[in-house]
Image (cartoon, helix red, strand yellow):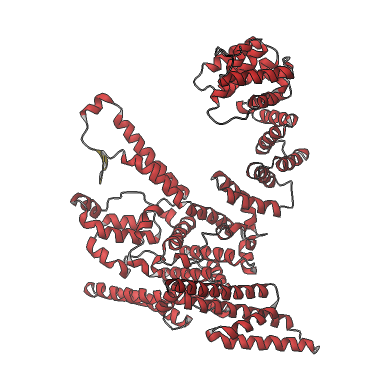
């Protein structure tokens, strides 16, 4: 019986998927202009499925479209035909989306909960306006009450209002497709100075969740309008996040969105928002860093007490002063360094609190979806019990008002403190009551900046999609690269947002976000018409060379720029062309690049050293030696010594080269190549036995990784120029490879002696 039930469930599930596929195909037909095909689909769908209250609307628009086709078929000229066709297409799309929403309210627990909490009352703008403006009036009247009446009345007003706002929040989520009139009225209401900012912020979030989970063009344009018209920064930033994500998820262009994005300040905000979204997505990675690197380091310093007067030490261990007299200073330095590291992560934009606060979203408070998005206020009825238990805690007020926490984390923190306050030591509770500022605080200037407000709101919305009970039913903007990497969406193509792509590409590259860098680079490469643009040259060459492993394509981009004289003073381009040319074995070009880099930066020893390497690749050893002698005197290093020894071998000065190799082999940081090159030098000097030993040492230095049988022959091929210049014949190379192979295997003559 259980097996039959499972099969029945799978059958029902497949049927629902097929039904949704039919509706999605219909939307695609409408988008492609195939309205009649879409109508036929919906006529068949309606004959086999319940479509609720939308049946009359569907029949009406089918009738209107058939009438329009009939007029055309009879040759009747209608100057408004194009407008009517567009109007019917829009009506049909809205009708299909409403039917899809109707299906969701029947099958999805998320929508079922929203419908239950929103009530059966449809969303009415006049009712919402009355509630929002009435609450402001009620707040004003509180100032006329006596102290005895104030507390009770405040509790009553906020309890009723928060309940009403929760109902409107859920009502918006299940509201059918809006029309232009609804959009205009809602935009005007949410930007009105006659309503409370917190209420407006909550409603903006409701509209955002609604349209992200179920596309609604007019809701998205409402958010864009609120962003454009609102004077309150917190309302604007919430609206910004909403319309940007909604635009990316709808994957459609709109004149109003394009117009917004052609404003430089808007483009700047979108670029900053894109970076902040990436920090949200890195929350788990940052949490691992904190758990593995930072927290253990802090725990090592648990002999320190954190008090209201700062960090103090516990009683000293007398033996430690004898065994490690510098222990105290070292401990304080490590603690300070660790704290600074976490603070730096937070200032750069990392969501360092996600890991900790993600465990604090299980309170019943968060069972109401609206509570994930309320700006923090102490009058919220959901935290009154917590406040009554803690009393007047100055520390909490400072932490909640000035701490670097998003709004939902503030509620989490307060509710968590309620559960632990009674278990804290008396001196800790005293410290909290005093108002002592423990932990980081945010200045007023930062807290009121658009960038900070937007970052905190992104953290709120990220937590909702990651931690909410219904997360698996939600269409999250954080799980699909097409959505969270919104700057590559066609919605923003051709606007001033496109000018920010190079900056964002370097941001992704620096943070090793390979997929995101590649996506942005591909967008730049596809859209750039001017191949002389240096952003294009830098990003395209990096993309091809490092990400696609296509040195040929990278070389083509850079060589063209070189031929057109674009790289004469371009350090980044010259460095990349030098690298690519070495891989391509175009040593002449590599030499030209590093020579120019040395001319531009005469004090940069790395450029000079690379220039010498390219000179030696061209067998211009004498020129290389002149530079390397100077470098070895002014900037001595193992790499300079290695290069000089190689150049001396190229000039035939084997004894001088050997002296340098012997010096390198005595150092602690000997590189495997030092054994290889020392072997060459001994071979050139006729010391074959020593050469065999160094070749064997070279193999040992490579570790236990499996080498091919021709491993040494491959090295000879790479260094053929040097070998031939010193009289080594091909047959000598073959024999030497065999000798070394036999020597390293240890299976020579019967007496156990090596071949030499």
Q: Quadrant of residue 50?
A: bottom right
Eyeballing the image, is 320 above or below 723? below
Residue at screen point 68% across, 46% down = 540
Extreme residue toward the left, this view: 426
Eyeballing the image, is 207 above or below 350? below
Residue 480 is situated, as x and y percent measured from the top left of the image, at 55, 59
Decide if residue 699 is on the left or right side of residue 209.
right
Q: Is residue 571 visible?
A: yes
Decide if residue 118 is on the left or right side of residue 528.
left
Total numbered labels placed on residues in the image? 0
Residue at screen point 33% across, 77% down = 160
Residue 273 is situated, as x and y percent measured from the top left of the image, at 53, 56
Residue at screen point 25% across, 56% down = 420
Closer-to-camera residue (59/371): 59
Eyeballing the image, is 125 above or below 335? below
Image quadrant occupied by the N terminus: bottom left
């Amino acid at each position: 019986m259980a097996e039959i039930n499972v099969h029945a469930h799978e059958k029902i599930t497949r049927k629902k998927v097929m039904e949704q596929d039919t509706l999605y195909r219909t939307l695609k037909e409408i988008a492609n202009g195939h309205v009649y095909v879409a109508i036929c689909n919906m006529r068949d769908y309606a004959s086999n499925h319940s479509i609720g209250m939308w049946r009359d609307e569907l029949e009406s628009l089918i009738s209107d479209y058939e009438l329009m086709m009939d007029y055309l078929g009879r040759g009747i000229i209608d100057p408004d035909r194009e407008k009517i066709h567009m109007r019917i297409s829009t009506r049909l799309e809205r009708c299909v989306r409403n039917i899809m929403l109707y299906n969701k309210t029947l099958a999805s627990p998320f929508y079922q909960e929203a419908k239950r909490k929103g009530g059966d009352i449809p969303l009415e703008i006049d009712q919402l306006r009355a509630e929002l403006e009435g609450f402001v009036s009620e707040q004003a009247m509180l100032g006329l009450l006596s102290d005895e009446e104030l507390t009770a009345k405040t509790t009553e007003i906020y309890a009723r209002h928060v309940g009403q706002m929760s109902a409107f929040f859920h009502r918006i989520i299940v509201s059918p497709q809006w029309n232009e009139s609804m959009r205009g009225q809602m935009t005007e209401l949410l930007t009105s100075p006659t309503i409370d900012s917190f209420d407006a912020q909550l409603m903006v979030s409701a509209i955002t969740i609604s349209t992200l989970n179920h596309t609604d063009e007019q809701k998205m344009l409402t958010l864009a309008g609120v962003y454009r018209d609102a004077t309150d920064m917190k309302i604007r930033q919430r609206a910004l996040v909403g319309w940007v994500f909604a635009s990316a998820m709808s994957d459609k262009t709109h004149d109003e969105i394009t117009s917004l994005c052609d404003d430089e300040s808007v483009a700047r905000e979108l670029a900053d928002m894109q970076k902040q979204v990436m920090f949200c997505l890195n929350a788990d990675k940052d949490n691992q860093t904190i758990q593995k690197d930072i927290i253990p380091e802090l725990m090592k310093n648990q002999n320190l007490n954190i008090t209201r007067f700062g960090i103090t030490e516990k009683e000293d261990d007398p033996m430690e002063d004898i065994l490690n007299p510098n222990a105290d200073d070292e401990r304080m330095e490590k603690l300070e360094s660790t704290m600074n590291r976490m603070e730096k992560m937070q200032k750069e934009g990392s969501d360092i609190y996600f890991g900790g606060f993600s465990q604090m979203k299980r309170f019943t408070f968060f069972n109401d979806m609206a509570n994930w998005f309320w700006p923090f206020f102490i009058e919220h009825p959901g935290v009154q019990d917590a406040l009554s238990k803690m009393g007047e805690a100055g520390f909490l007020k400072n932490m909640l008002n000035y701490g670097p926490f998003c709004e939902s984390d503030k509620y989490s923190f307060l509710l968590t403190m309620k559960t632990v306050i009674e278990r804290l030591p008396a001196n800790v509770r005293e410290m909290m009551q005093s108002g002592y500022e423990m932990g980081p605080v945010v200045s007023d200037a930062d807290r009121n900046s658009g960038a900070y407000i937007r970052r905190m709101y992104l953290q709120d919305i990220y937590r909702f999609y990651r931690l909410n009970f219904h997360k698996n039913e939600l269409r999250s903007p954080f799980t699909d690269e097409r959505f969270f990497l919104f700057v590559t969406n066609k919605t923003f193509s051709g606007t001033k947002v496109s000018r920010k792509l190079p900056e964002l590409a370097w941001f992704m590259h620096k943070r090793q976000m390979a997929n995101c860098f590649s996506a942005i680079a591909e967008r730049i490469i596809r859209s750039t018409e001017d191949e002389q643009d240096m952003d294009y040259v830098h990003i395209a060459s990096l993309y091809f060379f490092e990400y696609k492993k296509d040195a040929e394509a990278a070389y083509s981009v850079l060589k063209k720029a070189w031929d057109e004289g674009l790289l004469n003073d371009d350090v980044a381009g010259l460095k990349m062309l030098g690298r690519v040319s070495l891989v391509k074995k175009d040593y002449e070009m590599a030499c030209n690049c590093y020579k120019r880099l040395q001319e531009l930066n005469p004090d940069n020893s790395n450029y000079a050293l690379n220039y010498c390497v390219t000179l030696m690749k061209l067998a211009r050893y004498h020129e290389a030696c002149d530079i390397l002698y100077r470098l070895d005197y002014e900037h001595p290093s193992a790499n300079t010594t290695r290069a000089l020894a190689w150049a001396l071998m190229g000039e035939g000065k084997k004894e001088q080269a050997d002296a340098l190799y012997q010096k390198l082999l005595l150092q602690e940081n000997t590189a495997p190549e030092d054994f290889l090159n020392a072997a060459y030098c001994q071979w050139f000097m006729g010391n074959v036995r020593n050469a065999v030993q160094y070749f064997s040492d070279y193999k040992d230095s490579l570790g236990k990784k499996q080498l091919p049988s021709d491993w040494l022959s491959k090295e000879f091929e790479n260094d053929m120029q040097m070998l031939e210049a010193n009289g080594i014949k091909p047959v000598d190379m073959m024999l030497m490879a065999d000798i070394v192979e036999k020597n390293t295997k240890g299976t020579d003559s019967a007496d156990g002696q090596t071949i030499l």
